[in-house]
Image (cartoon, rainbow, N blue to C red):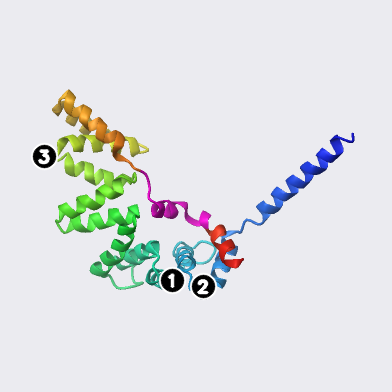
Amino acid sequence: MRIIKPLFTFMTIVILSLRSVHAQDPSPEMMFKRLAALASTGNADVKYNLGMFLNNGIGTPRDNRTAFQYFSEAADAGNALASYKVGCYLTGQFTGVVPINEAEALRFKLRAAEAGYDLAQYDVGMHFGKKGDLANAVIWWERSSRQANVQATAYLANYYSSKSSPDKIKGFALMLVLEDLMPNVTKELLDHIEKLDSQLSTAEKSEANTIRLSWVTGPTPLTTKARTGIKTIPALLTSLEH
């Protein structure tokens, strides 16, 4: 009994400690309030996250005008993800909040694209693609695709596997990459892969498979940060409040 009692006491302390940590995990409402209290510090990450809460209506009613204000301030302070959001607003993501300005939208999205954000890279590629500047579109789609962005990979695969394709081997490789990335592979994609497969030699298909295996290099730190979302906020709050 002398052994069991101290062990029981120790386990009780551990369990209570874990419960205490769990209880301290802030709710979305509490995170928003704490972020709002830090807005006057001018911290760009705080303002970006406040913008995201207001943009999506997380822990607070949606307010896109105020969200845009925070995104703009954070972008001016160097936050690349905020720059992307400013670009989204300037392309009309939320009608009536700000006037559409494609040139300014590209300028802001380019900041995020150059910093490594996959969604911005895809959007910049789409901008050039719509303008008929496929050379620049392909550059940005490739950067995004290598981070496993499905949409960028689809556009790139279609470009390289078209009738006037500059590189059918690469086109076939990217179709295979797209097959790997898609959660639900369509019959259309499988038919296209089968068609390309019949047009290439064994050596060419082997070359395509080599490209396929080395294509995805993984997300950049900025893309990872964006995909992590509000999970990063407790650490941000702790670092600024203490």
For numbered disc 3, what is the local secondary structure? Answer: loop
Mark pair 3, 1: CA separation: 46 Å
* 203 with respect to 79 (left or right): left
Q: Nearer the viewer, residue 96 or 15?
A: 15
Q: Residue at x 25, y 50 (%)?
A: 141
Which image quadrant is residue 212 in?
A: top left
The reply to whether the C-beta atoms of the residues labelled 3 and 1 are less than 8 Å apart is no
Residue at the right extreme? Answer: 1
Residue 147: say if magenta.
no
Q: Amino acid at mark 2?
A: Ala
Q: Amino acid at mark 3?
A: Lys
Neighbour class for label 3 at 10 Å: few (<14), some, many (≥20)? few
User: Can residue 117 be seen at all in this image of the molecule?
Assistant: yes
Q: Earlier in the sequence, mark 3 or mark 1?
A: 1
Q: What's drawn in magenta, residue-wise?
A: 218-232
The reply to whether the C-beta atoms of the residues labelled 2 and 1 are less than 8 Å apart is yes
Which label lies toward us, 3 or 1? Answer: 1
Q: Residue 70 bears which disc, if any?
A: 1
Q: Disc 3 marks which residue?
A: 163
Q: Amino acid at mark 1?
A: Tyr
For numbered disc 2, what is the local secondary structure? Answer: helix
Which image quadrant is residue 216 in?
A: top left
Residue 230: say if magenta.
yes
* 204 with respect to 110 (left or right): left
Q: Disc 2 marks which residue?
A: 39
x, y percent for residue 13: 77, 47
* 59 with respect to 142 (left or right): right
